[in-house]
Image (spheres, grey):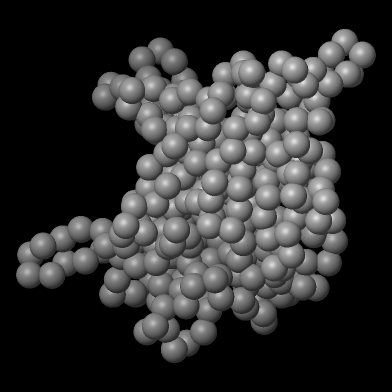
Amino acid sequence: PNRDNPVTRNAVLNFDTAGNLILNDGRATIWASNTSKTGVESAVMSESGNFILYNRDHQPMWQSFSYPSDTLLPGQPLNVSMELTSSKNSPHHGGYYTLKMLQEPTSLRLALTYNLPELASVSNYSYWDGPDISNATGNVVAILDQNGSFGVVYGPGSYNGAVYVHKNDQDNTGLLPNYNASGSGFGSSSLRRLVLEDHGNLRLYRWEDVNGSTGWVAEWAAVSDPCDIAGICGNGICVLDKTKTNSSCSCLPGTLRAGPHDDRCYENSTLTGKCGENHENLTSEFKITTIQQSNYHFSEESVIANYSDVAMVSKCGDACLADCECVASIYGLNDEKPYCWVLRSLDFGGFQDPSSTLFVKVQA
């Protein structure tokens, strides 16, 4: 609960006689479970890694599994009201990413989303989606099971429906919740954890112990191309190296590098759509810079207009220059047909794409 508010080495975790779990650092109370009136009599660290406060009837009154941070352990449920959030202590990507269930009118899906806390308009931009689950009934829970498979189970009581996001090659039993508060029945020979990393990828790790050499080994990742992750370069362009596994950032005209040790890019005052007092276009104050073989992550909210007729598509850069609210426009293909999107914001970052061209409005 205090992940983003680290304590000093003098901090103390107390379990008081009223049944309250309290984290103190010096004279300051950092966190409390607020369970003093629930009849709590014991605190147990279960075999599953779930820390639980039980009442006299051995019913859980508080448990750490109900408050996930950036990690999911085997058997730990992630329901529709919970989310994993990347660490805010990272110097580069503090708390920008979440794993959550996005609900649609008739379906839901697991999604990795990009969020900028300082901009309400930049929230829940989904850059990776799990399978759509239609007409799910009963409880819906994402789960990492003991066999190393990850997915969503649903249904009343016994979870009679299951959809895999990742299936372990050695899993022959099907996706099983295997969840109870005490963690009894956890007998897997391999320790695993699912982590939402601070750069936005969701990665499954397995603990290896081979000939005395131990460590966490990556077993699966949701995103194979780092440039598919929104915001990984701020609002710059993500560039893959020859190995297709590592990336660097290229800043757009009108943007600045975040810092000497931070590769991301951020807009300055020149990269913004500007209109006159009466919303007239100040065309003479701006020009268009063309960036070949580049595309951009954008949301529906950022689209001013999109064109598919040949006359407009061929003048995609001019379409941005003609609209005072436009910051950039993109020429690209949608189902093999040419399109032009005119955008009012550049928030999620770009990526290399041989079939696309990015037009950025800058001050003349």
Indicate the position of residue 200 as horizontal and vertical percent values.
48, 47
Q: Is residue 39 left or right of residue 282?
A: left
In the figure, is residue 176 to the left or right of 185?
right
Residue 196 visible to an observer of this rendering: no
**Whole-percent x, y for residue 227 in the image:** 47, 51
Q: Residue at x 28, y 75 (%)?
A: 189
- Which residue does the image show at 34% across and 75% down from the upper left? 187
Q: Is residue 142 placed above or below 255 in the rendered structure?
A: below
- Nearest the viewer among 150 and 324 is 324
Residue 259 lies in quadrant:
top left
Relative to 96, is 56 above or below? below
Task: Residue at 74%, 50% (x, y): give it.
Answer: 314
Q: Residue at x 53, y 79 (%)?
A: 175
Name the image quarter holding the C terminus: top right
Outermost residue, left side: 211
Name the foreground residue: 262 vs 30: 262
Q: Residue furthest bottom?
A: 172
